[in-house]
């Protein structure tokens, strides 16, 4: 090895040692500053024992001791309502004066014609009250809301969905999935959704009155000229309970609306069984336990306990 090569190697080692020395010196200086600074070191901090929070006893108010469901059940028990009777109106709003509780079956002392007139009056008052709401006026309907609603129902009843063998071909399945969009259109779907959202206080009462109107045979009135025969309503009950298109539509709605539709769909199928017109052979035996579980878990329904009473009666019938 030549002399210049030896000098080069020696110079590299010297630079390496110098770098390590500088690093050690800086580390030592940092440790000295840390040790002799006036701040407390992490290990010098005193351990602070956690103090238990002060307990405060708050006496429950009478309204907190009793849940809404218990109140409803107590009211029903005190007044001896049967599952075949409609519950009293609990929540009142600007449109609730149009809806008052009425018995589901035709009273022996009341003629069917007078009960139909009573139903027609309640429905007419409800839709007339909505005509004056700003969100309805903003739609700029060419007719009254009642007339518009009846026209929509007529279109749906005249063009029922496919209930049996829906999955035989893809076209039938897709048309069922878009059934309401095809028949009444997007704008009317949004209108109905607005009514459901904004009239939540009375929607259960209106559902009861409409169910009565459908199940009381041959109801007809100039005040509310809707014809919704049980055999045509049955098709939609089967659609919601027994088809992918109907179930997928309900799952896109809020839980309250979905439970109410399923509840009345079950009652309509039961009526169809009694009338011997269950032509699709729809079974509600498996639907009942699932619907009962959903309603029991819900806190969205005003008349929850009365719905459950009726469903448990049907469960005993279809076991």
Image: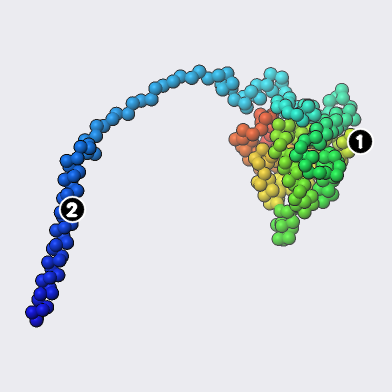
Instruction: Provide residue 259's location: percent of width, then percent of height.
Output: 67, 39
Q: Is residue 27 left or right of residue 73?
A: left
Which residue in the rendered view is the most extreme toward the left?
3
Which residue occupies 68% across, 36% down? 315
Position of 227 with respect to 100 (left or right) is: right
C-alpha span from label 2 to label 1: 99 Å
Residue 191: x percent and y percent? 75, 44
On the image, which quarter does residue 302 sit in? top right
Q: Which residue: 70% across, 45% down?
A: 241
- Seen at 72% across and 39% down, the residue is 196
Residue hosting label 1: 222
**Residue placed most toward the observer, 218 or 99:** 99
Q: Which mark is residue 26?
A: 2
Number of other residues with Cα within 10 Å of mark 2, as a class: few under 14, some 14 to 19, many 20 or more: few
Front residue of 183 and 163: 183
Crowd around label 1: few <14 · some 14–19 · many ≥20 (10 Å): few
Kindly state the secondary structure of the residue where label 1 is placed: loop
Q: In this view of the protein, which residue sits in the foreground, 35 or 293? A: 35
Between marks 2 and 1 in the image, the one whose residue lies nearer the viewer: 2
Residue in the picture at 44% in, 20% down? 56
Tell which circle, 2 or 1, labels the residue nearer the N-terminal end: 2
- The label on residue 313 is none
Question: On screen, 27 above or below 264?
Answer: below
Colouring method of the image? rainbow
Lateral position of residue 253 relative to residue 16, left or right: right
Q: Position of residue 35 (x, y in %)?
A: 17, 42
């Amino acid at each position: 090895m030549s002399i210049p090569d030896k000098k080069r190697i020696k110079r590299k080692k010297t630079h390496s040692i110098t770098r390590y020395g500088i690093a050690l010196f800086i580390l030592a200086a940092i440790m000295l500053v840390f040790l002799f600074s006036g701040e407390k070191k992490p290990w010098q901090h005193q351990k602070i024992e956690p103090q238990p929070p002060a307990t405060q006893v708050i006496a429950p108010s009478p309204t907190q001791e009793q849940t809404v469901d218990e109140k409803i059940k107590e009211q029903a028990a005190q007044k001896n309502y049967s599952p075949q009777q409609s519950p009293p109106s609990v929540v009142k709003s600007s449109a609730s004066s149009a809806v008052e509780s009425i018995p589901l079956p035709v009273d022996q002392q009341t003629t069917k014609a007078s009960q139909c007139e009573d139903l027609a009056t309640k429905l007419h008052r409800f839709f007339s009250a909505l005509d004056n709401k700003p969100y309805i006026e903003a739609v700029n309907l060419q007719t009254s809301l009642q007339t518009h609603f009846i026209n929509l129902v007529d279109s749906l009843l005249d063009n029922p969905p496919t209930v049996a063998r829906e999955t035989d071909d893809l076209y039938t399945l897709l048309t069922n999935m878009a059934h309401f969009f095809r028949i009444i259109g997007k704008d009317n779907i949004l209108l109905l959704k607005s009514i459901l959202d904004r009239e939540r206080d009375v929607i259960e009462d209106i559902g009861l009155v409409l169910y009565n109107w459908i199940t009381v045979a041959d109801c007809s009135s100039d005040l509310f000229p809707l014809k919704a025969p049980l055999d045509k309503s049955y098709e939609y009950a089967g659609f919601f309970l027994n088809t992918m298109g109907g179930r997928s539509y309900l799952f896109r709605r809020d839980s309250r609306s979905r439970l109410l539709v399923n509840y009345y769909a079950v009652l309509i199928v039961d009526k169809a069984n009694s009338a011997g017109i269950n032509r699709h052979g729809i079974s509600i035996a498996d639907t009942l336990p699932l619907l009962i579980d959903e309603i029991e878990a819900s806190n969205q329904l005003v008349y929850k306990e009365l719905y459950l009473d009726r469903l448990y009666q049907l469960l005993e019938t279809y076991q």
